[in-house]
Amino acid sequence: MKKWLFSLAILLSLFLALNVIIQTASADKKELDEIKQAIKEKGAKWEAGETSVSELSDADKKLRCGTIISDVKLKGTLPSIVGAGQTSSDLSYNWDTGSNRLSGDYVTPIKDQGNCGSCWAFSAVGQLESVQKIYRSLNTDPDLSEQYLVSCETNNFGCNGGYMDRAYTFLKTNGTTSEECFKYAQLTTSKEVRCRPCTKPQFVKIVGWAPVERTVAALKSSISLHPTSVTFNVYYDFYSYTSGVYERVSTKKVGGHAVLAIGWDDNAGNGKGAFICKNSWGTGWGENSSGGTIGERGFFRIAYSQVTDALVLFGGGAGNYYMDGSGNPAPPRSESTAVLWGQMKI
């Protein structure tokens, strides 16, 4: 009798679990259909579909957004970037595809922050990796530690979120070490990981950083120097992004997010223009850096209109790293590495 009841309980549990899965899948499909319809009605130029992030629970989705966006104007260590620095002929620019002043790939591979609100650290470190590759003329991709910021930057809140200006200042004061030295641990846990870098860490610092005004011209000016960290507000439709030029069609806000702006294309979105960005949600989401779906995914394009969208506020929290003591953001590549990276210590 007991054995029969036990078997019945197992079957009942399996039935209930299956029912929850079916209901969730049905709700997700309905939500995706609503997003697709909203895109069509708005005439937006992007595609929505199932992604590795859209399939997560609402709680796990929210953990992908951890940047705290403040109305307070950022105060950097150097004057703000406010004007247009690129020439009028630069209709497109991309630090990943070679469509840039150095004709090379200066964007490191896509990473995955996991269920941890550490996008602020990935954005800040992503810029540092690109800057290191550009100004040190590296032929390999530097792999720096986001976990060091998540665990050791005590003015921010680890997986519970962080401010971009605090991340920039931390990289100036403390820097970060290599991924090999302090590996990212939050893919398997969202719990706090103690600050404990390896015994002989090598730290890479920046000399200073400049706030970037939230305008299309200023953002282009900053990106023309090197990839630039930016923030924006994520809405629920963004989880289902698969390709195209994103414009918000959802009214359901999730939270602040930080990414790395690596280029722009004035002709994207039927000539309305878009920024090209590197995300930190893995390769099961988004498009490739050229706007296609073959190859490494994890990038996205976002319309210039989202800079002035009062709900999205794309480009807020932007900071541009300066690598030499004179405040020159783009020193010649022939200059001494010691000058550009004089803040490196063992």
Image (cartoon, helix red, strand yellow):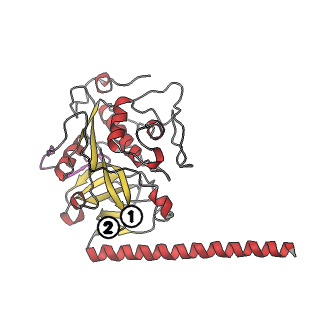
Q: Nearer the viewer, residue 253 or 230?
A: 253
The kind of residue tagged 1 is: Thr
Q: Residue furthest front?
A: 72
Q: Report the quarter where the C terminus lies.
A: top left
Taking the magenta stretch, the answer to whether it contains residue 277 is no
For the residues labelled 1 and 2, say whether their Cβ atoms are less than 8 Å apart: yes
Among the 4 quarters of the image, the one containing residue 294: bottom left
Tell me residue 235's x, y (percent): 36, 63
Element under disc 2: strand
- The label shown at residue 46 is 2
Residue 317, label in figure: none
Q: Residues within 10 Å of mark 1 (few under 14, many from 20)?
A: many
On screen, residue 174 above or below 234: above
- What are the residue bounds of the magenta stretch? 83-99
Q: Percent x, y for residue 85?
A: 15, 43
Report the residue marked by disc 1: 242
Q: Residue at x 36, y 45 (%)?
A: 163
Cα–Cα span, label 1 and label 2: 8 Å
Disc 1 element: strand
Quadrant in which the N terminus is drawn: bottom right
The answer to whether 259 is drawn above or below residue 327 in the figure is below
**Residue 95 lies in the magenta-colored region:** yes
Residue shown at 73% from the left, 75% from the top: 11
Q: Quadrant of residue 269?
A: bottom left
Q: Position of residue 28 (x, y in %)?
A: 47, 72
Is residue 217 something one can see in this rendering? yes
Instruction: Name above or below for residue 166 compared with residue 251.
Output: above
For marks 1 and 2 on the same chain, the one whose residue lies earlier in the sequence: 2
Q: Amino acid at mark 2?
A: Trp
